[in-house]
Image (tube, helix red, strand yellow):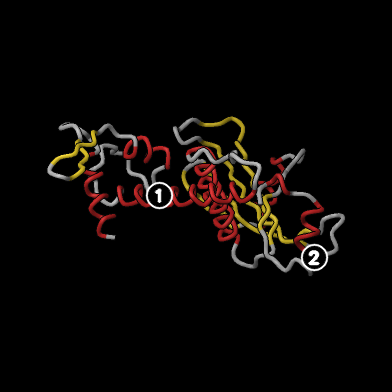
Amino acid sequence: MDAGNDSKENLRVCLSSETKADFIIKRNLRKENPDTWPSIAKEKAICCHEREGKNVYVGSMWVREKGLDQPIRLIYHVIERTILKNGQVLLVPEIEVDMYWTTLTCSPWQVIQLYRNHGTSEQFHSEIKTDMDLERLPSEKFLTNDLVLHAGLLAYNLLRMIGQIGLEEPDAPLKKKVHRRRIRTVIQNMITIASRLVYHARQFKLRFGCHSPWFSTIKRIYARCSAI
């Protein structure tokens, strides 16, 4: 869970014997000064010198929070920048601090990566709500909304499959190398593309313009999906 769920009540529920679930909750620094953490990190954490002027400290400690019956593991990720990526030297170091409550016993780097995967899943949720326009369901009846949501998820999975197959060959006019395409991009470039439905020789065909930039990509995706 993100920092909006960092409360004693939530931690108490997650740590209770009835819940029986591991968790990662990002800690909300609130009014705490992040400048106090570099000295703690330099003393106890592992330092990774990523580039000149940027040091990254990752470590963990056990903390007994007021109002909780047992200590809880705290993962901290401290970044200290004295030189920016463009070479600008800073008079005062720039400090960035991220901390996470967790019950997991794996390494701090693994905990941080697991939380970042949570952020990636939130991007998929955002696509379903915004790109698929399913943020507000249309009916006051649960069964109707259930049907709409299932239809939307089917369309989402098909669009996701089209987008991933489109990345397998470098025939798309978009040259920027990416690992996935947003649903909105797939809809704009491959679903709403200009074409004409033609009936000829007792067959329906789609006719594209002779200079259609996405034709080769769409043809390849169609052949792949037909084979499936």
Which residue is drawn at the image coordinates 85% and 63% (left, top)? 69
Say which quarter of the image contains residue 172: top left
Q: Position of residue 90 (x, y in %)?
A: 56, 31
Pointer 1: what residue? Answer: 160
Q: Position of residue 67 (x, y in %)?
A: 87, 56
Kindly identify which numbered label has been placed on residue 16. Answer: 2
**Mark 2: few, some, or many residues within 10 Å (few <14, many ≥20)?**
few
**Mark 1: few, some, or many residues within 10 Å (few <14, many ≥20)?**
some
Spatial CA distance of label 2 from label 1 is: 39 Å
Q: Is residue 159 left or right of residue 111?
A: left
- Which of 194/10 is in front? 194
Which residue is drawn at the image coordinates 35% and 47% (left, top)? 163
Kindly identify which numbered label has been placed on residue 169. Answer: none
Q: Is residue 166 left or right of residue 6?
A: left
Mark 2 vs mark 1: which is more N-terminal?
2
- The secondary structure type at the circle numbered 2 is loop
- Which of 131/66 is in front? 131
Q: Position of residue 50 (x, y in %)?
A: 48, 48
Q: Is residue 47 left or right of residue 224?
A: right
Q: Is residue 216 left or right of residue 60?
A: left
Which residue is drawn at the image coordinates 28% and 38% (left, top)? 175
- Tag 2: residue type? Ser
Residue pushed farthest left?
201
- Which of 192/185 is in front? 192
- The secondary structure type at the circle numbered 1 is helix
* Label total for image: 2
Which residue is drawn at the image coordinates 70% and 41% (left, top)? 34
Q: In the displayed structure, would residue 134 be above or below residue 59?
A: above
Mark nearer the viewer, 2 or 1: 1
- Tag 1: residue type? Arg
Say which quarter of the image contains residue 228: bottom left
- Which of 28/17 is in front? 17
